[in-house]
Amino acid sequence: MSFHNNSKLIKRILLGTGIIGIGIIISVYILYRRVSTNTDLLLTTVENQASMSLKNVKHSAIKEGFKQWDLDAESAQLVELGKKMILEKPSVIFYLENGENIRMKADEGILSIETNDIGVTGNVVISRGEVTLETQALQYLSKKRVLSITTPVEISGSMFDLRADAMEYDLDTEITSFNGNVKGNLRENVSL
């Protein structure tokens, strides 16, 4: 009787193990089918695991033989399968057709590798000669070569200071547009 009970116990264990094994195989198959047919889920899964960290990043954009800008950053994280770069302490030099340049620094930013658009936030400072601009966020739209600012901006130089709620600067035409609560002071060197 003891041998018969042990035999039944072994059969039950083997049957239970077989059922669990088949259940695992079916679960893996269903999960595989779900991931392989749902591309968004597949991209999210790969995206979360495909990040790369870089130190002392340097990147340039050249269009039709003309250097558009040079970018330096303390560090960067590649995300979205290498389509975007999250930047720490980015510094960008924008080159103008007349040979001058505009320098920009910020706390953090995002570079779109596909479009060369740049978005920066946190203590954004732009300088051109003696003129300095300060704001909290800025977008560089590469296709239009425009600096777009939708946060309050302060510009100062030796002859003026200016404040506005928003601003846009075209790097090709060098035309600046200000919007919302535009206020400023002009100073003139007067000798008596």
Image: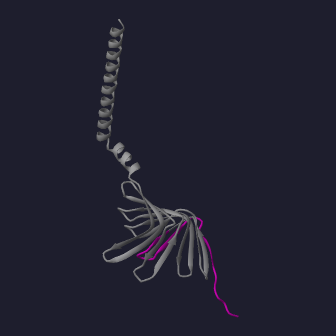
| In the image: residue 190, left or right of residue 88 | right
Residue 139, position as x, y percentages in the image: 47, 64
Q: In which quarter of the image is the C terminus?
A: bottom right
Q: In the rendered view, how is the structure colored? A: one colour
Name which quarter of the figure residue 135 lies in.
Answer: bottom right
Q: In the rendered image of this protein, does residue 130 appear above or below residue 23?
A: below
Measuring 37% from the left and 62% from the top, which residue is drawn there?
113
Residues drawn in magenta: 168-192
Name which quarter of the figure residue 54 lies in.
Answer: bottom left
Residue 71, position as x, y percentages in the image: 44, 71
Name which quarter of the figure residue 94 lies in.
Answer: bottom left
Q: In the rendered image of this protein, does residue 171 appear above or below residue 85?
A: below
Q: Front-most of 16 and 71?
A: 16
Residue 160, position as x, y percentages in the image: 61, 79
Q: How many marks?
A: 0
| In the image: residue 101, left or right of residue 45 | right
Residue 70, position as x, y percentages in the image: 42, 73
Measuring 52% from the left and 70% from the top, which residue is drawn there?
105
Q: In which quarter of the image is the N terminus?
A: top left
Measuring 30% from the left and 30% from the top, which residue is drawn there?
25
Tell whether position 179 is magenta: yes
Q: Front-most of 175 and 24?
A: 24
